[in-house]
Structures are given as structure tokens and as C-alpha cells.
Image (tube, rainbow, N blue to C red):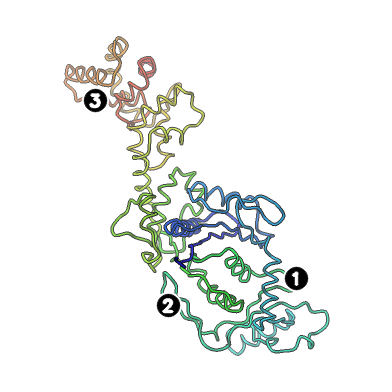
């Protein structure tokens, strides 16, 4: 019988804003690692900051996860009060966090600190003046609480080892070491009785059975401190895997000025979730030279050993090219449903017929929807200067050919094209001289899908009306 633990990973965002693209990459990697190993992937909302945590942010995070297709295994969670939730709430566990701190005091691994804010301010000022590192100096570490001044509510601090080093065997970054002398006795519980983030994260991860903590490398300094909490509680620490940062195209930290930091922005801009999954996967992870990686391949291939150590730059050109690929291979009916904005059944059928020619030219769903607008346009077009020039030069041709279009018995793209070719031959001009003004008359632009196929889809009545309108 195997003693191998079931892999359990988690995504633990703070609900103080949107789901950032970096957080989405973290969630994806944690999800893939759990699914690859037939394990569990859990969602925990770190909502202890009550002033900044909002229901709207939680809803945005959940919506982003669902749109990305990252399902989690505690969607039907019922808390201690019988409330149904889609996630674990860190705030709900605050009493459990406090009890863990008290347990550490019992074990001699934590202590009450009665230093006042004023006292600590003086301490920091003296350290700064002497050029010393600014950190708590352990003044209550070995003092008897009986010496405590009256009226001061204590904090609970961890007894961090004073000597030696803390070593983390990171699954991505390798062996990382910090001297314990660089760390101070961090606060576990504030004077008002609220647990700190550092304490809450460790207790929650332990209680949830997390075996692998996969997160951004901006948490690396937290990890050294959190390892000491695991040791103080006598718990086995999970495997840590810190992912390199995602940078903007200019090498700076990815932010709003680079375009779209939130997952919801990518949905609004017309990217497909499968595109974003594929693209985020390739930010610091690789499988040979493979660029287009299906979900099935990602689940089969994903491992932490193939995660690189260097930051990745976000390349919007690559993202657009990848999205164009996924649009091209996506089912036409699915694309119609994605860009359908209250179309009638007749219009949906028209869009479905046009989709094979429309989708091969679009990089986003927004572009795809815009390229289809001419199909449903009513009334006169507003032509730009270029289109107007083409139209004016070709009006005589359109007037000549209009009767032939009206009298056609079988209005197919092939027959329409034959009429235009025959007419161009009789006039001694190239096909484009006749077809291009026809394109402008039907689409309002010099750019469109194959115009004869578009004409067939629009139908004989609509085509002749549009040509008559510009004559």
C-alpha cells in the first residue's frame, strides 16, 4: 500500500480588487499541478482585511476563475454556521488562528510582548541613528509577563531562532537560505486580538492539508518566516514553489499602464479563455519548443521541474497571434454564440454562414464582431475617404451590372463572380476594378471577407438594394 500523499494545492487571493493576470497564472499552475497528480485544488479567500475586502471583489475573482475554466474542489463548502460558500474564508477561521498562537506560547515558541507603540518608535529611531537593521529587538522575549505595565494590551510574537539559518528547498528556485539573525520575532496576534496574515496563512494551509504551496516569488521572504511557524507548531511544512514575476514588455512590473492587468479585461477585449490558459502556461514554463498547447497536453505534461527561474515578459503580439489561432480552430456555432448580441434567428444563420471567412482574419472576438457588422447594417454607410474614392471610380460599373444582379435566377457566389468576370472582360479592365467598388457598396469598406460569398449570404434583395443606394 502506497504512503504517497494526495497532492493538494490552493489559490488564495485577497479580495481587495480584481483578479490580476499574475494571480491567474499562479492559479493555473496550482490547478494544473493538482489535476496532473490526480489531487485537489482548493480556493481560499484571504479576507481578513475587512476594510478592503469586498463582496464585489470576491465575485470578480470567482467570475475570473470560472471564465478561465479553473474549477476547484470546495465549491460546495458549508461553514461552521451552516452557510453555503463557494470557497474557504480566512476570516471565518480567526479564532482557530488565535488558538494556534496560544498553543505556541504553551510550547515556549511564542510570547506576549507588552512594548508600547511609542517604545517601539524610539527603538526604531535609535537603530536608524546607529545604522542598524530596523527590526524588533526581542525586549520581551525572555521577560516575565508579571513585569508587564498596567493597561497595555500585548501582542503575541513568535520566538524566531537567534542563530543558524533557515533553508528552503524550493521546487522552482532550488535551495534558498537566509540567516536567522536577519529575521525578527514577528507578530502573530495583534493587540486587538486579530491574527496576522503570516499566522493565518500557515494555519489555514495546514488545516486544509495543502501539500504544495505554489505562489509568486514576491512571497519568498514570507516563506522563511512561515517555516518557523510550522516548526513552532511541530507541523510538517509543505513543498514551496515560487514562480518568477511577470513583467511588462518594457521589463518593468506588469501594471495598468501596460494595458490589461485584470483577467476581466482580457475577456472584454475579446480573448478566448483557452488562449489565456495557453499563453499564461508559457510564461516561465516550457515543453520543448511547443507553443500551442492544448488543455489535454497541459494536464499531461505539466510539472514544476520545467518552470524557469527567470521573470517572463508579457508579449501582446504573441498573445494576439495565439488568440487568432484559437479563433480559427473554434467551432463556428460557438463563435456565433460568443459574439451574438441579441441577433434574430435569421441574423444568426447569416452570421454562421459567414463565419468561416470572418474568423480567419480576426485576432480577437471584438475584431470578429466588428468585421461582421456590415452583414446587419441598415441604411446608408458612412464611407471614409479611401472607400469613397473607390466607389466614385466604380459607380459606372455598378450601374451597368445592377440589372444583371437583379435578373439572376440562381444567386450563388460562383454565379455572381462569373457575372463580374464576364463584365470586366467586356470592359477590358481587371476584376478588381469592378469587384472593389462592389465590396465598398456591400460592406462600407475596402476590406471585407470574400465579397462574392458575402453577397450570397446577404441575399439578392439586400445586395441589389445596397448597390442601388450608392448609385
Classify 10 Å Cα crowding around label 2: few (below 14), some (14-19), many (20 and above). few
Q: Quadrant of residue 425?
A: top left
Between the residue at mark 3 and the residue at mark 2, the CA separation in whole angstroms equals 69 Å
Which label's residue is closer to the chain start, 3 or 2? 2
**Disc 1 or disc 3, which is closer to the eye?**
1
Q: Secondary structure at mark 3?
A: helix
Q: Quadrant of residue 246?
A: bottom left
Along the line of sight, the residue nearer the viewer: 181 or 446: 181
Q: Which residue is mark 1?
A: 192
Q: Is residue 48 left or right of residue 307?
A: right
Q: Which residue is mark 2?
A: 175
Between the residue at mark 1 and the residue at mark 3, the CA separation in whole angstroms equals 80 Å
Residue contact between numbered discs 1 and 3, judged by CB atoms under 8 Å: no
Quarter of the image with the C terminus is top left
Along the line of sight, the residue nearer the viewer: 365 or 446: 365
Residue displayed at 47% across by 52% down: 259
Q: Is residue 397 left or right of residue 77?
A: left
Amino acid at each position: 500500500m502506497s504512503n504517497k500523499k494526495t497532492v493538494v494545492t490552493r489559490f488564495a487571493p485577497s479580495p481587495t480588487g480584481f483578479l490580476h493576470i499574475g494571480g491567474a497564472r499562479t492559479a493555473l499552475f496550482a490547478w494544473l499541478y493538482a489535476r496532473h497528480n490526480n489531487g485537489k485544488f482548493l480556493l481560499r479567500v484571504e479576507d481578513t482585511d475587512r476594510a478592503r475586502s469586498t463582496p464585489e471583489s470576491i465575485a470578480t475573482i470567482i467570475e475570473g476563475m470560472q471564465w478561465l475554466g479553473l474549477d476547484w474542489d470546495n465549491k460546495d463548502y458549508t461553514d461552521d454556521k451552516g452557510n453555503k460558500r463557494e470557497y474557504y474564508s480566512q476570516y471565518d477561521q480567526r479564532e482557530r488562528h488565535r488558538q494556534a498562537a496560544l498553543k505556541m506560547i504553551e510550547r515556549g515558541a511564542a510570547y506576549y510582548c507588552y512594548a508600547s507603540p511609542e517604545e517601539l518608535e524610539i527603538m526604531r529611531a535609535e537603530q536608524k541613528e546607529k545604522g542598524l537593521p530596523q527590526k524588533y529587538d526581542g525586549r520581551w522575549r525572555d521577560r516575565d509577563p508579571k513585569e508587564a505595565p498596567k493597561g497595555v494590551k500585548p501582542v503575541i510574537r513568535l520566538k524566531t531562532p537567534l542563530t543558524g539559518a533557515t533553508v528552503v528547498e524550493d521546487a522552482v528556485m532550488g535551495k534558498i537560505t537566509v540567516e536567522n539573525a536577519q529575521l525578527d520575532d514577528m507578530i502573530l496576534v495583534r493587540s486587538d486580538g486579530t491574527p496576522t496574515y503570516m499566522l493565518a496563512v500557515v494555519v489555514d494551509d495546514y488545516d486544509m492539508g495543502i501539500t504544495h504551496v505554489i505562489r509568486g516569488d514576491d512571497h519568498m521572504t514570507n516563506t522563511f518566516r512561515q517555516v518557523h511557524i510550522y516548526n513552532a507548531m511541530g507541523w510538517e511544512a509543505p513543498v514551496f514553489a515560487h514562480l518568477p514575476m511577470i513583467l511588462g514588455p518594457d521589463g518593468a512590473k506588469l501594471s495598468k499602464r501596460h494595458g490589461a492587468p485584470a483577467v476581466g479585461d482580457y475577456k472584454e477585449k475579446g480573448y478566448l479563455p483557452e488562449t489565456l490558459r495557453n499563453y499564461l502556461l508559457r510564461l516561465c514554463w516550457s515543453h520543448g519548443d511547443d507553443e500551442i498547447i492544448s488543455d489535454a497536453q497541459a494536464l499531461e505534461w505539466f510539472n514544476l521541474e520545467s518552470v524557469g527561474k527567470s521573470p517572463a515578459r508579457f508579449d501582446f503580439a504573441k498573445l494576439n497571434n495565439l488568440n487568432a489561432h484559437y479563433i480559427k480552430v473554434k467551432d463556428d456555432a460557438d463563435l456565433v454564440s460568443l459574439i451574438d448580441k441579441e441577433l434574430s434567428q435569421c441574423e444568426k444563420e447569416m452570421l454562421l454562414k459567414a463565419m468561416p471567412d470572418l474568423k480567419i482574419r480576426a485576432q480577437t472576438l471584438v475584431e470578429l464582431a466588428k468585421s461582421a457588422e456590415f452583414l446587419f447594417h441598415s441604411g446608408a454607410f458612412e464611407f471614409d475617404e479611401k472607400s469613397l474614392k473607390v466607389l466614385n471610380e466604380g459607380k459606372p460599373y455598378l450601374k451597368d451590372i445592377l440589372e444583371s444582379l437583379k435578373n439572376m435566377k440562381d444567386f450563388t457566389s460562383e454565379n455572381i463572380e462569373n457575372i463580374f468576370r464576364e463584365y470586366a472582360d467586356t470592359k477590358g479592365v481587371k476584376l478588381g476594378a469592378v469587384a472593389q467598388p462592389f465590396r465598398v457598396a456591400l460592406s462600407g469598406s475596402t476590406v471585407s471577407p470574400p465579397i462574392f460569398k458575402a453577397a450570397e449570404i446577404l441575399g439578392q434583395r439586400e445586395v441589389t438594394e445596397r448597390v442601388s443606394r450608392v448609385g
